[in-house]
Image: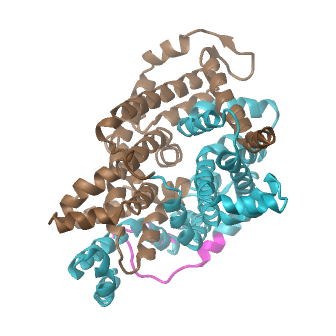
Amino acid sequence: MRRREARWAYIFMAPAIIGVLLFSLGPMIASLLLSFTSYDMLSAPQWVGAENFTKLVGDKIFLKSLRVTITYSVVSVPLVMIIGFLLALLLNAKIPAMGFFRSAYYLPTVISGVAVAMVWKWMFNGDYGLINVMLGKIGIDGPPWLTSERYALSALIITSMWGFGGTMLIYLAGLQGVPPELYEAASVDGASRFRQVVHITIPMLSNVTFFNLIMGIIGSLQVFAEPFVLTGGKPNNSTLLLPLYLYQNAFSYLKMGYASAIAWVTFAIIMVLTLLIFRSMPYWVHSEASDDK
Amino acid sequence: MTDGTTGASSPEAATAKAPAATRRRRPLPLGTTVRLLVLCIGTFVVLTPVFWMLLTSLKEGTDVFVNPPKWFFKPRWQNYKDVVTLVPFQRYFLNTATIVAGVMFGTMLSCSFAAYGFARLRAPGKNTIFLVLMATIMLPSTVTLVPTYIAFNNIGWINTFKPLILPAFFGSAFFIFLFRQFYLGIPRELEDAARIDGAGYLRIWWSIFLPLSRPVLATVTVFTFVAAYNDFFGPVIYLTDDTKWTVSVALSYFQGSPRIGPQMQLTMAATTLAAIPSVVLFLSAQRYFIKGISMSGVNR
């Protein structure tokens, strides 16, 4: 009986197991091996040892791309999380037209990708875009956003902020799991709304914040459509996020080995950041171990 | 501000409904009013790009590049007809629909199937397998991209839809997680009753668990649809022939395309057309969608 159950369990898990082997672990190992080779897809891969990685250290474009990517993540991830959290707080109450507001705020996330990039490209148009038109109304001479080295990355970050919907929704789900008794007890004790948010909501949602933070970092290190459409990495590589540089190397220059090395550096950054965040967990993530669950 | 009308009417509705709302958390009607006001302003800001897109899509070509912009004009619906006739938009939609349908079908089937195993059946090593599976959520797709591309290239699948559809039939960690969480909450008795009636595991999954998981199915539908429909990286590297293009890929080439050229009103009309399917799907599923997310217990 137990044997039969186990056999069926493996049958049910089979698509997932095969999927992990074929599309995650397998390619991961292959990618690591490729990163030590020079491979243009025309002739057989040549083993070059750590050459790709040593080249990366001296590659000015790569270093710039790395800097741009880090700036982008460090600014965009917290901004998206803060906006998402605040909106979730506002939406987590019995208010009229709730469905309308939730849908309105989630809408940009649904559109996402190229369509979003197209709209923002038009919004950021230096002469006729709505952003500069609005800025002009209050007497500010808006910059040529997408063609100026100084502002192009900001434009990309503003675009990314429009994607707060996913983060907001996860916070909203989290908020619905906070026991109302906690707030009731706090308001009996005379705690203000602000104090309730600081002392109840934020600690109770720290695990949701943790999830959003890790997902946000991984997501921000993989953004492709927006920079591709908005700027193509220009001007002067000021918006060349790592995935774009990887794409150029792999599919424009056919340097598959070099591209794999870039992928592994990205991966290493994600792993280090994730590890640091995991390590920091006991200091700020509220544990529910004592709860009934 | 055009938004003023909704802003003025909603607070009145708020005061009317206030007695019901006060019972639980006792918000002052003033608090609700402020909340609504902030939400309305926020909605206005958030939806401005959409509004700007729609406005541009209905302008005459000569009115697009005018500063200050024209706010009131006779809408030119012809732009939408022009887009559809200038480029083979129907074909792009059909290509996209094929891929999206394949991905959705594959994901639902494989993820609910695998999740049943993870949630309900006992087997040695199951938890380790589940942990490895969950770890793949954190694996960035850029790492697997190059070898996967090379592999698909070697078996001659470049410029076909296969590399975009097939992987969906092998599950996806996050969705397996969502289904599993839901299945864990289904009472044992239901399963036991079916077992007594002689149903096998396959039958229990297909006729009990799958139909019960409607909120998860709705959530996964929206997520997979949006992801597959908006996917750009995949189609852009795998589909080289322009007759195979998806809507996203075609869209990204619009401004430079000889047929559309620099006509911003057509580009925005195309962008609007491209956005409609996701928006319609989301609006029709949003009720289930929010519920599905809350039930998944991300905060547990």
Q: Is residue A19 positioned above or below B29 on the image?
A: above
Residue range in magenta is B61-82
| Residue B248 seen from this side | no
The coloring applied to the image is by chain
Residue A285 or residue B169, whichever sits in front: A285
Residue B267 or residue A23, whichever sits in front: A23
- Does the magenta segment cover residue B107? no
Chain coloured cyan here: B
Horizontal side of residue A103 vs A135, given as left or right? right
| Figure disc tally | 0
What is the x, y in percent for residue A193? 20, 65
What is the x, y in percent for residue A111? 53, 61
Residue B92 or residue A26, whichever sits in front: A26
* Residue beneath the point at 54% across and 53% down: A113
Horizontal side of residue A226 vs A192, given as left or right? right
* Residue beneath the point at 59% across and 73% down: B284
* Residue beneath the point at 55% across and 65% down: B289
Looking at the rendered image, the quarter that the N terminus of chain B falls into is bottom left
What is the x, y in percent for residue B8? 29, 86
What is the x, y in percent for residue B3? 34, 80
Chain coloured brown here: A
